[in-house]
Image (cartoon, rainbow, N blue to C red):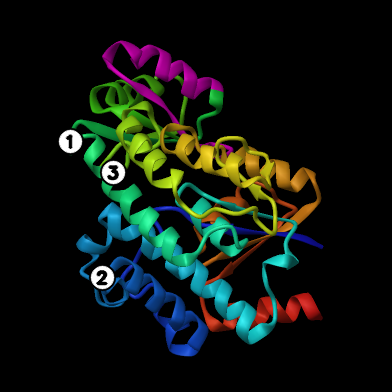
Amino acid sequence: MALAFTFPGQGSQAVGMGKPLADEFASARAVFEEVDEALGQNLSQLMWDGPIEELTLTENAQPAIMAVSLAAMAALKSDFDVDVSAAQFVAGHSLGEYSALCAAGALSVSDAAKLLKLRGQSMQKAVPVGQGAMAALLGADMEQAEKAISLASSEGIVTIANDNAPGQIVISGDKSAVDAAVAAIKDLGVRKAMLLPVSAPFHCPLMEPAANAMADALKDAALSNPSVPVVTNVSAGAVSDAETLRTQLVEQVTGKVRWRESVDGMHAQGVDQFVEAGAKVLTTMLKRHIKDAQGTALVTAQDLEAFAASLKG
């Protein structure tokens, strides 16, 4: 059984996140402490005690989600002797790509935390609150989504931000254009379109100022070749070269998250088990996507134990 480790993106944050891992594993606690120290912020307390409104701020949610993913991976290695080398690939959804790079040894936890803090701040600053929007098109195929975007393009910028799974496409851009696309999609036979409760229009050309900020930050970041190939958001293909990864981390700020293609590509190359570190968002999507693949979410100590036992049994 070939496996891939996957790492969730924004939206999986919740008060109490990571606390069971920190309570159970010293190695997981060490990850949270390292992130707190790198940021000069008691992020772990915010993660465990809230308030949710502050945790959900992009600049907090991004490093928090990364920290939980890497805490799960640290505990898996220290207590169950399973590490990233068990995988054929790693892949992360949006900010999860930074988690994947850390897991594969290409980026340090401290550097990833700082980069994600900046990424979140830059994304929020790029577009004034209320001027941008994102919407999920549920049941839409790519042709229908592109048709709706074409019909709405006269209202402003709107593009496909996330191709998550069959029937789950997210669009992003100027609020007026996104509203027009949502209205148009209802006339194209799509089951449902709904605006998402986000504070900025991620993964669209309006994020260009954030991409520029990340280009400056990543230029000097210590990035090495990963020990396991990383299937990247912008290419949907496996990358093992640090400089290509550096470039693509900038491109993914404005680019489409090609998650459906990424999962399909890994599956086509023999991956039949997708193991999500720290949440179960990607695992839930997988169930609707590839019926003969196994999805495993590593959230609790029991999850880690059962997964490690399955590899050795």
Q: Which mark is residue 41?
A: 2
Query: 37 or 309, which lies in front?
Result: 37
Amino acid marked by disc 2: Gln
Q: Verify CB contact (< 8 Å) between mark 3 and mark 2.
A: no
Q: Measured from the top left, where is residue 249 in percent x and y?
A: 49, 42
Start and end of the magenta stretch?
143-169
- Location of residue 287 (image quadrant): bottom right
Q: Residue at x 69, y 82 (%)?
A: 81
Based on the picture, tell me whether residue 166 belongs to the magenta stretch.
yes
At numbered mark 3, what does the secondary structure look like: helix, strand or loop? helix
Disc number lying in front (3 or 1): 3
Amino acid marked by disc 1: Pro
Based on the picture, tell me whether residue 130 belongs to the magenta stretch.
no
Query: 34 or 18, which lies in front?
Result: 34
Disc number lying in front (2 or 1): 2
Q: Earlier in the sequence, mark 2 or mark 1?
A: 2
Q: Measured from the top left, where is residue 2 in percent x and y?
A: 79, 59
- Give the alpha-carbon distance from disc 2 to disc 1, as whole Å: 25 Å
Amino acid marked by disc 3: Ser
Q: Earlier in the sequence, mark 3 or mark 1?
A: 3
- Give the alpha-carbon distance from disc 3 to disc 1, as whole Å: 11 Å
Residue position marked by numbered label 3 in the rendering = 122
Q: Residue at x 34, y 30 (%)?
A: 208
Residue farthest toward the front in the current orientation of the protein: 220
Picture quarter with the N terminus: bottom right
81 in relation to 13, above or below: below
Mark 3 closeness class: few <14, some 14–19, many ≥20 residues within 10 Å = many
Query: 297 or 202, which lies in front?
Result: 202
At numbered mark 1, what does the secondary structure look like: helix, strand or loop? loop
Picture quarter with the C terminus: bottom right
Q: Which mark is residue 128?
A: 1
Q: Residue at x 52, y 63 (%)?
A: 280
